[in-house]
Amino acid sequence: MENRFGVKGSLYNDVFFTESAVSGAAVLRHLSVEISRQNANLTEVKQRLAEQARNLGATVVMNFRYGQKKHKWWELVFTFKWDTESWYGEGDAVKL
């Protein structure tokens, strides 16, 4: 954990992730990912979000939220979800 821009967070692939809002930051875009594999992990979520952020020229993902969520029964039947749960992550891409 490190402090940057007045908030605590962590660095992954040159993108700073924080669960807090950064004061004075202008949001470029809201980012989100879903990995439809139960055996995925937080590193994979951050990797995908960091790639999206870098493509926008962003250096920070603020308001970062992540976790696992259970698929609904109809998602298992009518889509290509192989596991009963997915990892997800979301946040706001900003350039500071």
Image (spheres, grey):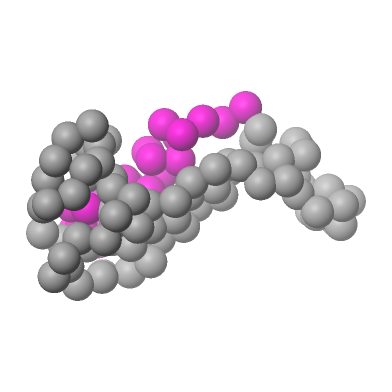
Looking at the picture, does residue 31 appear above or below residue 39?
below
Q: Residue furthest top?
A: 39
Magenta segment boundaries in residue numbering: 39-60
Q: Is residue 83 above or below residue 77?
A: above
- How far from the left and from the top, in percent, is residue 41? 51, 30
- The answer to whether 45 appears left or right of 20 in the picture is right
Residue 36 in view, yes or no? no
At which x and y percent is residue 60? 22, 53
Number of marks drawn: 0
- Residue positioned 41% across, 31% down in the render: 43
Residue 8 in the magenta stretch? The answer is: no
Q: Name the residue: 46% across, 34% down.
A: 42
- Whether residue 44 sits left or right of residue 93 in the image: it is right
Q: Quadrant of residue 1?
A: top left
In this orientation, does residue 81 appear? yes
Asked if residue 54 lies in the magenta stretch, the reply is: yes
| Residue 16 figure quarter | top left
77 horizontally vs 68: left or right = right
Q: Residue at 56%, 31% (x, y): give it.
A: 40
Indicate whether 28 appears above or below 95: below
What secondary structure prevails in the magenta region? helix
Query: Residue 96: horizontal and vertical position, in percent?
Result: 10, 59
